[in-house]
Image (cartoon, coloured by chain):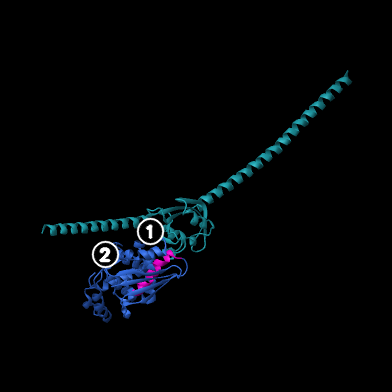
Chain colours: A blue, B cyan
Amino acid sequence: MIVRNLKLLGNNLYMLYKEELEKLLKLDGQIKGVFLQTDAKYILEKEGEGGLQRLEKKAKEFGLKLDYRTARAMQWYPVGLRPISLLLIKEVFGYNDKDIREMGRMAAKFSFIIKFFVRFFTSIKKIFEKSPDYYKMQYSIGKLEPVYFDEKEKKCILRLKNFKIHPLVCFYLEGYFQGVAEFALKGKVSCQETKCVFRGDEYNEYLIQW
Amino acid sequence: MVEENNNQNLISTEEEIIQTLEQDLRELETYIQDFWKFLPLPICYVNPVHNILDVDNSLVEFSGYKSIELIGEDVKILFNDPQIEELKKEIFHKDSISFDKMTFLTKDKKEIPTKVIAMARKSEQGEVIGYFLAIIDISESLNFQKKLEEEVKRKTKELQEKIEELEAFHKIAVGRELKMIELKEENQKLKEELKKYKS
């Protein structure tokens, strides 16, 4: 998990990334290893074994050790690895922001933590109410607040405070929250990031409708 | 100073407890994942709104779907059988139920006869929080049963033919016997008549 040998690579692209990766690795906070498992699973499903090997190779080129195959869901990792893994995936497979969002949506489906704490997933209201606890299980920084819920209007709002990691993570989380909501709902579900710290707002806000 | 030391001891104990719990969770995680990988029977876990939450490798192989295509979908995607609606209702009232014959539907629309067993999972408060579904392929045993029935039918037919042959033989044999008796009687009569003429 250390950026090293970057100078030796002598490639402009790597030099461009160097600064960003080092900055991300210095971010305060931790994340549970489940994100490495879900990334690996998604890539295996979409790109096959060869795809995962390409991703591992790319991480190695950057001097990064990302335990895609051996990560444990409940183990803590530096939070900077979340955007770093997404950046690498974007780089290797040419994914756009929409693809990263879809990856987040699918991550909810593959998450061991979701399956393990499945008792929350009996209704959308319960998921909404329990979302701060569930968030705390996965991130050591930031605070998720359930601010609005209306079963008749079929919408709810989640607010994420003190969480400024990377814009790519915002797309990812937008998909992730949708994926979690889809577990408890039938029919079309949508999630939209209505406020974002990278657009000058004080916090991130997500509107979920069904 | 003593109080400070006590507090430090408390903190380290708390940290130790957290570390132990996290270690336990990691081991539990490995156990669960290994168990799901090992299961030789197609199994899935479904939540109370009947969306599939987890599938094992055997179900992926059996259905032809990728796990990504099944997780989050309504469980009815796996069946072409009205009994699935009955299962969905019943599981909230019974701890476990089974259906001897339900038609499973693979991704390429192949229908497979299966036996389906469902077991409810409940919270401490007794609320159903999901259910496990085990799917047993019975196509081989049904084929065997069909073959067995065909064999019994064939043997019965053969037996029937033998009986008919025997009956025909019996009829012929009995007819011949009667004719012989008749001829003997006639012979006897003629002998008696011949005796009269001689005397």
- Residue B36 vertical position relative to residue B189 in the rendered view, above or below: below
In this view, the residue in front, A138 or B45, is A138
Instruction: Name the secondary structure under disc 1.
Output: helix
Magenta-drawn stretch, dominant element (helix, strand or loop): helix
In reply to whether residue A165 is colored magenta, the answer given is no
Which image quarter is the N terminus of chain B in?
bottom left
Spot occupied by residue B128 in the image (x, y as percentages of width and height): 42, 55
Amino acid type indicated by mark 1: Arg
Residue B156 shown left or right of residue B89 in the figure: right
- Residue B138 vertical position relative to residue B164 in the rendered view, above or below: below
Spot occupied by residue B186 in the image (x, y as percentages of width and height): 82, 27
Which image quarter is the C terminus of chain B in?
top right
Residue B169 shown left or right of residue A117 in the figure: right
Mark 2 or mark 1, earlier in chain: 2
Spot occupied by residue B146 in the image (x, y as percentages of width and height): 56, 50
Please give the residue where the numbered disc 2 appears in the rendered image: A76
Residue A119, disc: 1
Please tell me how crowded label 2 is: few (under 14), some (14-19), or many (20+) other residues with Cα within 10 Å.
Answer: some
Q: Which residues are magenta?
A: A170-185
Q: Chain of mark 2?
A: A
